[in-house]
Amino acid sequence: MSLPVTDTVADAEIRQVDTLIIGSGFAGLGAAIRLSQAGKDFLVLERASEVGGTWRDNTYPGAACDVPSNLYSYSFALNPGWTRSFSPQPEIQEYIRSVADRYDVRRRTVFECDVQTARWNAATHRWDVATTRGKYSAKVVISAVGALCEPSLPDIEGISGFEGEIFHSARWNHDADLAGKRVAVIGTGASAIQIVPAIAGTVGHLDVYQRTAPWILPRFDREYTAPERFAFRFIPGFQRLSRALQYTARETQVVGLAKAQAFMKPLELAARIQVRRQIRDKELRRKVTPNYGIGCKRMLISNNYYPALDRPNVDLVTDGIARVTPRGIVTKDGTEREVDAIVVATGFHVTDSPTFAGIFGKEGRSLAEVFDETGMRGYKGSSVAGFPNLFFLVGPNTGLGHTSMVYMIESQLEYVVDAIRTIDRNRIGTVEVREDVQDEYNRDLQRAMRSSVWNNGGCASWYLDKHGNNTTLWPGFTFEFRRITRRFDLEAYRSVAESDLPAESDLPVATDRPAQERTSREAAVR
């Protein structure tokens, strides 16, 4: 589906739709499929020209998934065509495209449509959504933007004045020829440990800048055999059995991550053995060995990262970066290393996503303002008090450190689609999670975090917000999350029937007071 492009958003005709889905990665695509199956009116807004989300954007050398292939797919659309036990990026992106085609989602997607703002309109009881391709009015908005979509750039003195090639790992410049060049990679997270081995053999020299050493486990990756691929495709239940076994094995890690850290010792031993086997230099071993509990930060998997660091043309730099010059990087000990290109592999905005600044609730406050004050809090990762008829996929405290996010996404889809069915069936005008319910839910979450390695492992991570709360991860078994999201619990929400919503003429006259002081329609209804 396409719309005529207008010169300005203000000139665009406002298009009415029941539900707007923002984003077309795994979450947004899943929402579109489920709403289509439920016979609901919806439209997907996608800022890029193709579906795929994270797997469309991250095309850096070596990009691959760290979750087994059979787990990293929709339960309703298994992929018998995986070639490896851990899928590379091109295969995952092709899978997502194929699912979009199979369920005819593109027809109801507006591509190259960047959402600028979404504002709750107290007069119409709908969301006013301004985009680069026109204006929309929606009864319900589903944010499927995802947590790993907005690259986080380091705040380093002089970095904007660097004269060589510089780009983020999630915006890889494929026109940049790194062969034989002096290259710096800033960061040692999940992307960096894939990039470093992929380019170490072709660049002239590689400096890897490490702030904190990650725990790295063996990657049990292999090609699927011809009999396995035959069984996936033609033997009923074989792939689902493989998926179930992988799910169960991964779920056992929750005991060590969230309940009792002592159960993480076998994984720590495996990681330490890998360091000793793959790195000969004792000083380098010391540098790459973490000084915090395994699992406190995201655990990574790789068989070739340590050997890449051990190459003669690769240096691991652990002195902090002081500044960037036009031709190189200066560390805090005063050493300057000249480079031709810098790859920034410093992750993403998760708890402070720039997208939060463009979503305005019933009191006129942005989601960014609310989260800045209280932390990134929600209810079942799907709703936030003060933002009626707005649902999130991969929202607060839905992240995982051990298994597939697609499982969590499908759990949330069940909840959100049931919410929309409930709204339609009962002719509800607005629903908003009660603040007391949200507060109690988050108290329980943070209480559950107290025994977790994320809070007690001795590290600083992006899992924690500035308030010191873990607002990113789910602190339990994923089947527990699925249980609490199996149905939409209307009793946890403040709802107003369509027939009870006041007409626009009944609303108080607007004043010049600040937006957060104005009386919203929802407040008037209460």
Image (tube, grey):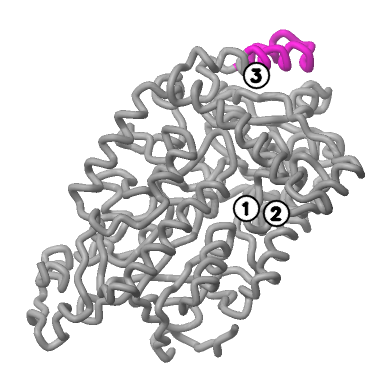
Three-letter code for the amino acid on which mark 1 is drawn: Ser
Of 480 and 342, the residue lying toward us:
480
Q: CA distance from mark 2 to mark 3?
A: 38 Å
Q: Find out whether the residues at labels 2 and 1 contact each other: C-beta distance under 8 Å.
A: yes
Q: Callout 1: 10 Å neighbours few (<14), some, many (20+)?
A: some
Give the quadrant of residue 243.
Answer: top right
- Give how far across and how far down residue 216 sits, in percent: 66, 25
Q: CA distance from mark 2 to mark 1?
A: 6 Å
Report the residue marked by disc 3.
288
Assign the N terminus to one quadrant of the image: bottom right
- Give how far across and how far down residue 359 sits, in percent: 34, 64
Extreme top residue here?
282
Q: CA distance from mark 3 to mark 1?
A: 38 Å
Three-letter code for the amino acid on which mark 2 is drawn: Leu
Query: Residue at 57% of width from left, 76% of height from top?
Result: 109
Extreme front residue here?
236
Query: Residue at 37% of width from left, 81% of height from top?
Result: 137
Label 2 vs 3, first from the N-terminus: 2
The total number of labels drawn is 3
Q: Determine which of the numbered discs, if any, sits on residue 78 in the image.
A: 2
Using the image, determine if residue 433 lies above or below residue 130: above
SS class, disc 3 = helix
Using the image, determine if residue 110 lies above or below residue 253: below
Q: Determine which of the numbered discs, if any, sits on residue 75 in the image.
A: 1
Specify start and end residues of the magenta stretch as a single range: 269-289
The answer, for residue 328, to whether it is visible in the render is: no
Query: Residue at 36% of width from left, 60% of height from top?
Result: 357
- Give how far across and how far down residue 69 sits, in percent: 72, 44
Mark 2 or 3, closer to the camera: 2
Query: Residue at 82% of width from left, 27% of height from top?
Result: 313
SS class, disc 1 = loop
Give the quadrant of residue 454.
Answer: top left
